[in-house]
Image (spheres, rainbow, N blue to C red):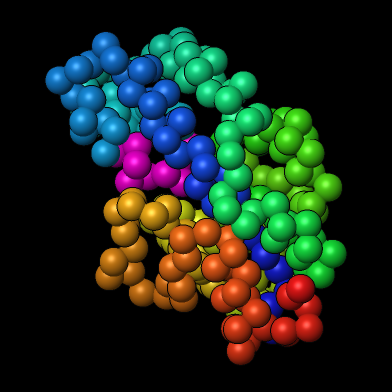
Amino acid sequence: MLTTLIFDFDGVIVESIPLKTAAFREVFAFAPDHIDEIIAYHLDNGGMSRYDKFRYIYAKILYEPLTPEQEEHLAGEYVRRIFDAMLTVPYVEGAEDLLRDCSGALPLYIVSATPEGEMREIARRRDLTRYFVRIYGSPKTKAECIREILEETGAAPEEALFIGDAPNDWEAACETGVRFVARIRPGDENRFLGRPGVEEIVANLHEFRGYLREDTGSSRSRIP
């Protein structure tokens, strides 16, 4: 039986991946010879904290030291480019209906790589907090957040389902034993090929809702 639903935010609830990719490109415009590699790494690690991305990019792509001051400058420039737009970026198709209708049937959680304070403020200003029991973000890892949810709810891992859009989300699901469904935006690369345990791939949350209804392991009466 499915008792707990866990959502990534970017690329699952809102269509923010193009916005954040453009911001990453602008922040690292000072390194044009490496920009394609930087953007590829950003996209391949969509569920990773921006700070961890900055550190990897400097250490493994730019081969330069990254001071704490530089790191905070990068983060500030990045947030300056995205924050206001995150308040109006469109929802993934079906997200508003799903959250409204399912929040009364199951406990819902957000587990995001966005810094937790920032993620909660975005959710508050988009009037989303009413749908979620709790909203998690970095610096905790997604696996740590999921373990907290399982402990809080008393749900067994097989009773919880995480929907994400990045291999890092799949890795967190594997690490904690929860079920996993992948959302891939139409036209985007399938980064889940060859990864076991992906129950379903959906293009939007209308499809995800249909999957929940059809899932023989969940209680149909609880999914509106």
Residue closest to the far bottom: 216
Verify whether residue 94 appears in magenta.
Answer: no
Of residues 2 and 73, the one nearer the viewer is 2
Horizontal side of 21 relative to 124 (left or right) equals: left
Q: Is residue 6 above or below residue 199?
A: above
- Is residue 3 in view from this perspective? yes
Q: Is residue 219 above or below residue 118?
A: below
Q: Position of residue 88 (x, y in %)?
A: 63, 31
The image quarter in which residue 48 lies: top left
Q: Position of residue 8 (x, y in %)?
A: 57, 51
The image quarter in which residue 211 lies: bottom right
Residue closest to the far left: 33
Which residue sits at x=71%, y=46%? Answer: 135
Q: Position of residue 10 (x, y in %)?
A: 53, 43
Which residue sits at x=19%, y=24%? Answer: 34
Q: Is residue 110 above or below residue 156?
A: above
User: Which quarter of the image is occupied by the N terminus?
Assistant: bottom right
- Is residue 140 in view from this perspective? no
Tell me the magenta residue range: 41-49
Of residues 98 and 141, the one nearer the viewer is 98
